[in-house]
Image: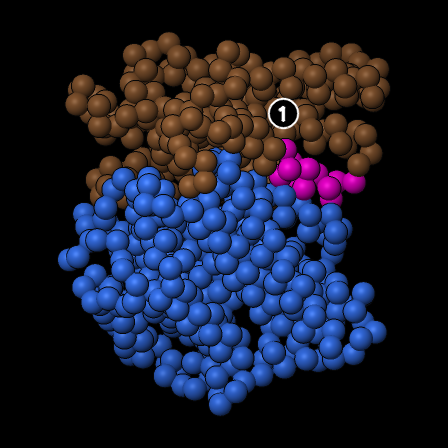
Chain colours: A blue, B brown
Amino acid sequence: MNKQPSTTGLRLGGDTIEVAAMTALLIGSIGLFSLLAPGFLTATNFGSMSMQLPELGLLSLAMLLPIISGGLNLSVTFTANIAGLMTAWLVQGLLAGMGLLSVPMAIIAGLAVGAAAGFLIGVIVAYVGAHPILVSLGAMIFLQGAGEFLTRGGGISGMPEVFQTLGSGSVLGIPIPMLIFLAAAAGLIYIMHFTRTGFSIYMLGSNPRATEYSGINVKRVLITVYTISGILAGLAGMVMLARFNSVRVGHGESYLLITVLACFLAGANPFGGFGRVLPLVLGLMSLQVIASGMNLMGASQHLATAVWGAFLIIVMALRMPFIKQS
Amino acid sequence: MHKRRLNRRIGTEGTLFCILMLLCVVLALATNSFLTLQNLFDLLNNQSVNIIFAVGLVVVLIAGGIDISFAVAASVVQYVVLSLLMNYLGGGNWLLGILLSMLVGMLLGLFNALLIHRFRIVSIIVTIGTFNLFFGLLMYFTRGVSIYDIPDWLYYSVPLLDLPAERGSATLYLPAAVMVVMVILTWFILARTGFGRAIYGFGSSPESARRSGVSVWKIHAFAYGWLGLCAGMAGLMQAHIVQEVVPNALIGQELPILAAVVLGGATLGGGRGSVLGAVLGVLLLAVVQNGLNLLGVTPYAFRMIVGLIILIAITTSNLGNLLPRTTKARNV
């Protein structure tokens, strides 16, 4: 297996193996539950799976980038929350009189809040040099607190109908949230594999010192990483707002550790430098298949959570001998 | 990690202690309820569970690991121990309860240690895995139902020290004593035994510790086992304080406690940190919350301010990194 840091573009070698493994996992889990769970192979089930996947999917994409750069962003769920709150508040308050135009403006503002949260984390990580886990942990507690302070523990609900369309509508049979997720994943694949920034992020995760010596502005790359992460989290916040027609601090909080789980499952290296978007998308689909399949078999969501945890440990136990340790 | 630190002279613990004292003086002057025996005893009663968690976690951090699963483990301990006691052991008593809690907690910790050691999986991945595993199984088997029917010995609070105070009396309860015991035990092992030194050594440089004959398995087993044991104790004490067992009551506590311990000088790289620092870290955040409460600030703002304090503390304790370094070109 080729263990060099990637050059731009999609490569054969390690990538193909990872994608193949994740595809096999996906096909395997679909096959398993088709046999075990009645009603699994129905359009309704696949429809509901593709409704549920995007929130976790977007948050996982937001987690992937920092992990590739050798860090972690524990604030993704509350960034999503704050972005959703901002949008909901703007739509109902400041921009309420502006009619249809208010929705895109509020969404842009929400994404900007996500970007700003990520940017600040990136600045602290880059210039202070503290461990990203700590910085994003502090940011997480701060954002959660800011949300609680602003909403006084309550929620904002009753969005205009446009949001309902965004949340539950579909184009050519594919739910709009799913399309947003796939578009975000495609965008991220482009950034990570076909731009200098993506190349720098992989390099930074593989060997920060070598990256710095090779003349790459490490600080700027780090800030970019966390800003993109914040935007993706903000996008997840928009999708959640649209799907539940409301926003409340703590919505989706339980996704946090699962996003990390999904990234590691899909071959991201906890020490940075490795991790691809495509295997992550496939791995997420497998996790969703497991959850839906078990649900159809009458098991609770909680048992699915337990299986995910066990699954992560088993996969990592098998993978660990091949992982680069720093 | 080996950057020059501005506060090296007095150490993180010293800085923290000064900030804590300053805060206490300010609060004592600004409010007339902070410096009362009741308030201080309440602080200790309420923080005992967090401090027990914190001294367990600091051992894992010093050994160079991280653990996310301890709060879930404590919930599992509560359920397993109380179910065992109520269904098979006729209610039990304090001795049995404490021993069982420590044992079950330790076993859960050793499970983490086994996975980390045997399969060489990074601790954060293992504990995220076991977090989901433990939590999922706990919720599945309990169906989210709380236990309200707890034995008498656990139900009635045990006053240890009852002093007359302005309004009624100020009472220190059993969890505070358990906390003191756990703090002293952990401190003794870390600071006064050769094994404690080995944990620091292993945390700073696993490879050189291994080559100098330190048993890596013993370190892993002790660190995660001890945290599990502490989590078991904390779980029992939490059930005692709130007089019920709620399956998801402790979930979400792990990250703030981690932040408090790191505030107390432990690093994620390992090899650094102390029991005193961990205790001070928890106390600092507790005193801030208590003070805000007494000053009449809305509770909804507490977490925001705590988050801000953590961010500021991280930034200032790494201030050295912001200064220009001579060996490096400025515009890299």
The residue segment tinted magenta is: B298-310
- Please tell me whether residue B147 is drawn above or below residue A52 in the rendered image: above
Left or right: where B288 falls relative to A286: right
Front-lying residue, A313 or B199: B199
Q: Could you classify mark 1 by the number of other residues whose Cα lies within 10 Å: few (under 14), some (14-19), or many (20 or more)?
A: many
The structure residue drawn at horizontal position 27% and vertical position 75%, both measured from the top left corner, is: A27
The percent coordinates of residue B218 (x first, y second) are 25, 26
Is residue B300 one of those drawn in magenta? yes
Decide whether the magenta segment is chiefly helix, strand or loop.
Answer: helix
The percent coordinates of residue A53 (x first, y second) are 46, 70
- Please tell me whether residue A110 is drawn above or below residue B215 in the rendered image: below
Q: Residue B296 sits in which quadrant? A: top right
Q: Is mark 1 on a helix, strand or loop?
A: helix
The percent coordinates of residue A138 (x first, y second) are 57, 40
Amino acid type of disc 1?
Leu
The structure residue drawn at horizontal position 63% and vertical position 48%, both measured from the top left corner, is: A143
- The residue sitting at the top extreme is B192
Left or right: where A112 falls relative to B187: right
The structure residue drawn at horizontal position 46% and vertical position 44%, both measured from the top left corner, is: A219
Front-lying residue, A157 or A298: A157
Left or right: where B150 falls relative to B214: right
Is residue B221 one of those drawn in magenta? no
Please say whether residue B54 is visible from this viewpoint. Answer: no
Please say whether residue B35 is visible from this viewpoint. Answer: yes
Q: Quadrant of the N terminus of chain B?
A: top left
Disc 1: which residue: B284
Front-lying residue, A64 or A48: A64
Q: Residue A189 sits in which quadrant? A: bottom left
The percent coordinates of residue B213 (x first, y second) are 17, 20
- Please tell me whether residue A221 is drawn above or below residue A104 in the rendered image: above
Left or right: where A228 falls relative to B67: right
